[in-house]
């Protein structure tokens, strides 16, 4: 049983943490709800790999295309029958069975450019994503602190009040916090995992300024990665601005990322970090994961709204009582004959 003094202090901490971080939470929840629409609009659940990548055939294709230009990246189909290879500024679809280049159909999702290749459509999630991750102006540390604080608020909530329904803002706040606790918990929990310093990937491997004197070619990267990664699950490989390579593999359940340097292959995050990334981004159950994320964002917004409104009403009531008390006090100071 929690002591009344401890409970009162925790309620004060709960209330003022939410009030101080209110503008940041509004930005995170609004942009999070917008980003949750992406898996919903994409519709179909994520497809799983249906065949292993023929590594020898892929290596032969890359060796042939490397002679024609600088190969900067490869993206493989889930059935491992074709690969999209970026050679310079040009993308080529290549059959891994025959090695022949497949003509690319004109995509309706691109806009034609009179001076060059088709221009991809504008990413309507780019700005909300930048705000959600770093508040647009590089405040990633602030987002990290607010995320951990939100997790604390959600976990602490059920200990502060029993689940009893009252048709007030505080009653709705308490009831929703109790009965929707799992839904309210998973977004701040996965977010806190993503910002935890001890789970973060090595930033020096990703920093654009930490350039290699000699960039690793895609063919060299495959040879280096083959010693420690199952390339049969290869999904894509891209050259990074710092000269290293980013490799993505897709297994039965998880998608993993690796950075390839001349001396080593480093995994970006462990299993916990990878799983939290997929859940938080809504990449684990297709459209349904987007619906769950959207409901979680709406639920957290409801908790924030009812909690704030309850505090505002209490503040107004306290001021009203204070003004009434001041009025009665001034009335007692009047001479007996001048009172109403």
Image (cartoon, rainbow, N blue to C red):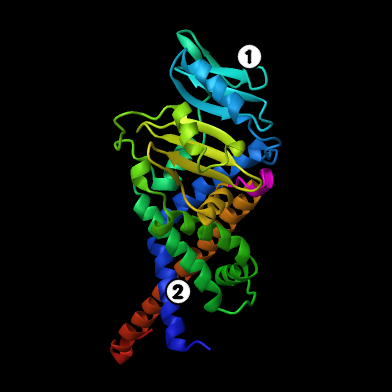
- Residue drawn at x 59%, y 30% is 55
Residue 119 seen in this snapshot: no
Task: Return the residue nearer the eye: 86 or 192.
Answer: 86
| Residue 100 circle label | 1
Residue 36, compared with residue 319, is above or below; it is above
- Residue 128 location (% of width, % of height): 47, 41
Counting residues from the N terminus, which is met first, the one under dot 1 or under dot 2? 1
Q: Nearer the viewer, mark 1 or mark 2?
A: 1
3D distance between C-alphas at marks 1 and 2: 77 Å
| Badge 1: residue crowd in 10 Å (few <14, some 14–19, many ≥20) | few
- Residue 75 location (% of width, % of height): 56, 28
- Residue 130 location (% of width, % of height): 43, 41
Find the magenta span and give its range.
Answer: 282-289
Residue 147, compared with residue 16, is above or below; it is above
Magenta span has 288?
yes
- Residue drawn at x 40%, y 53% is 143
| Residue 317 circle label | 2
Q: Give the prevailing secondary structure in the magenta stretch.
A: loop
Label 1 SS: loop
- Residue drawn at x 64%, y 77% is 164
In the figure, residue 324 lies in which quadrant?
Answer: bottom left
Magenta span has 306?
no
Quadrant containing the C terminus in the rendered view: bottom left
Task: Return the residue nearer the eye: 154 or 18.
Answer: 154
- Residue drawn at x 51%, y 20% is 63
User: Is 16 left or right of 118, judged from the image as shown?
Assistant: left
- Residue 211 location (% of width, % of height): 30, 34
């Amino acid at each position: 049983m929690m002591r009344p003094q401890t409970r009162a202090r925790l309620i004060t901490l709960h209330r003022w943490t939410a009030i101080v971080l209110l503008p940041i939470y509004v930005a995170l929840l609004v942009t999070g709800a917008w980003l949750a629409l992406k898996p919903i609009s994409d519709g179909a659940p994520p497809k799983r790999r249906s065949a292993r990548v023929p590594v020898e055939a892929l290596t032969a294709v890359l060796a042939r295309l490397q002679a024609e230009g600088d190969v900067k990246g490869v993206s493989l189909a889930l059935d491992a029958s074709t690969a999209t290879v970026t050679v310079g500024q040009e993308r080529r679809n290549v059959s891994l069975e025959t090695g022949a280049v497949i003509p690319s159909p004109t995509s309706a999702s691109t806009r034609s450019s009179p001076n060059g290749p088709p221009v991809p459509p504008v990413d309507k999630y780019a700005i909300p994503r930048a705000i959600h991750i770093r508040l647009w102006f590089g405040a990633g540390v602030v987002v990290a602190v607010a995320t951990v604080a939100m997790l604390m608020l959600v976990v602490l909530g059920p200990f502060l009040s029993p689940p009893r329904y009252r048709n007030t803002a505080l009653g709705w706040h308490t009831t929703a916090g109790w009965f929707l606790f799992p839904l309210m918990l998973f977004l701040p929990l996965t977010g806190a995992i993503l910002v935890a310093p001890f789970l973060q990937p090595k930033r020096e491997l990703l920093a654009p300024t930490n350039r290699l004197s000699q960039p690793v070619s895609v063919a060299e990267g495959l040879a280096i990665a083959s010693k420690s990664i199952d390339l049969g699950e290869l999904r894509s490989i891209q050259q990074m601005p710092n000269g290293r390579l980013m490799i993505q593999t897709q297994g039965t359940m998880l998608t993993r990322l690796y950075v390839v340097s001349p001396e080593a292959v480093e995994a970006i995050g462990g299993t916990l970090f990878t799983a939290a990334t997929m859940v938080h981004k809504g990449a684990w159950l297709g459209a349904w994961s987007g619906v769950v994320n959207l409901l979680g964002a709406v639920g957290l917004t409801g908790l924030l709204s009812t909690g704030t409104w309850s505090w505002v009403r209490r503040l107004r009531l306290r001021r009203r009582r204070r003004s009434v008390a001041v009025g009665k006090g001034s009335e007692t100071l009047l001479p007996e004959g001048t009172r109403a």
